[in-house]
Amino acid sequence: MIDNIRFTFEYNNDKEWLNSLKQNINLSKKFKNGNGSAYIGKLYFDVNRLNKKKIGSISNTKSSSLLIQIKEINSGICRINIMNSMRKWYFYDSFYRDFTKKEFSNCMELISNKINVPLEVILESTVTRVEYGGNLNLRESYKCFHNCIYSHKDLPKKVTYSGETLKFHGENKKVIFYDKITEHKNKDKITAEVQKALNKKALSLRYEISKTKIVKGDLEYKYMKRLGNIIEYWDNIADLWYNELDKIIFVNNMSPKIYDYLKDTQIKNMTEFLTYLGLEKLGIENLQTILSDRALLKKRGILNKKYTEIFNKYKNLIEEEDFEYIFRQKVLQKRDEFKA
């Protein structure tokens, strides 16, 4: 559930602690001021994972890392920032896996051990940025999902990228839907052949919420202000993720059956579908008025029958499979998996 995150804490500094960090982190000194030095480094889950590649599988060609920034703020005290995708760091060989509560807790313990900081200090860290969400396995025909997600009640800006990614933006928040398989192909983490084989079987859709700032008054502030809060309120965060769908406005202008029907279609079928969309927008009940105003008298009956048949044909295809209902059920199923 938790993915990209940034958290910060303060810790008593001594030379032995900094030297011990160098066993797991390639620290480099960035600058030095009156208060002391600042360091930056990358923490790898396992150095043996670097540049590891599994032929024919879906794995990162390079191991993900956590970025660590250390700054001496006064004598004997350091401020430490840790950031990046904790999920990718922990599940390096599977871009599809999501944290369970137990796995996330284990991840915190692992970080504590690797940087030689007590777990209770890690859990008291302040969370300043977080992404939480889940990967949903849908049929390939659900690639039409972008057409069914219209707007967000609280986030006015809508952005789409190549029909694969949809984002709603607010001041400190984003709600994002994207195809994980295509994302990893674009980042050269899977081959085109693997992507093609996977796309024939399913759509790996990720739905996530990104908070670029944890603001007092938001539910994220209550549930995720501290790292320890995330474990304590794990089920509440899963509910928060699911309930975000109540703010999404869906439209029924596409369905998997229509997507399959129009795939590699002829111009006639596409013209019919565009006609249906026009009639849906204008209102089928207004068809007679439009024809009376625009069509010749002897053509009105023929046109009325033709357009009504087209409208009913696509309306029935859409109503057989309601994308919003099926998508909500998938998210609900994933939420229950998080809470199990």
Image (cartoon, rainbow, N blue to C red):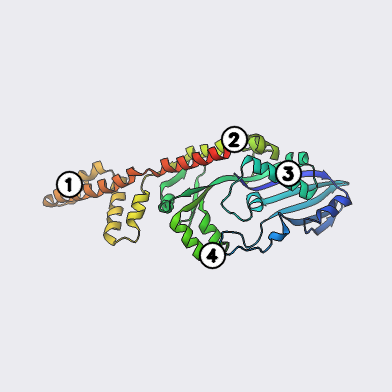
Secondary-structure class at tag 1: helix
- Asked if labels 4 and 3 touch by Cβ distance under 8 angstroms, the answer is no
Q: Quadrant of the N terminus?
A: top right
Quadrant housing residue 50: bottom right
245 left or right of 1 in image: left
Could one spot residue 245 in this view of the protein?
Answer: yes
Sequence-first disc among 4 and 1: 4
Residue 187, horizontal then vertical, whole percent: 57, 62
Sequence-first disc among 2 and 1: 2
Say which residue appears at 33% left-offset and 43% top-offset: 320
Say which residue appears at 72% left-offset and 49% top-offset: 82
29 left or right of 246 in image: right
- Asked if labels 3 and 2 touch by Cβ distance under 8 angstroms, the answer is no
Q: Is residue 139 or residue 311 the one in the foreground? A: 139
Could one spot residue 218 in this view of the protein?
Answer: no
3D distance between C-alphas at marks 2 and 3: 20 Å
Q: Give the labeled residue for mark 3.
A: 109
277 left or right of 21 in image: left
Sequence-first disc among 3 and 1: 3
* Amino acid type of the residue that numbered disc 4 sits on in the rendered structure: Thr
Q: Give the labeled residue for mark 2.
A: 235
Mark 2 against mark 1, which lies toward the viewer?
2
* Amino acid type of the residue that numbered disc 2 sits on in the rendered structure: Asp
- Asked if labels 1 and 2 touch by Cβ distance under 8 angstroms, the answer is no
Q: Quadrant of the C terminus?
A: top right
Q: Give the labeled residue for mark 4.
A: 191
Q: Residue furthest left?
A: 298
Say which residue appears at 42% left-offset and 42% top-offset: 326
Above or below, 72 relative to 189: above
Residue 124, horizontal then vertical, whole percent: 74, 38
Mark 2 against mark 3, which lies toward the viewer?
3
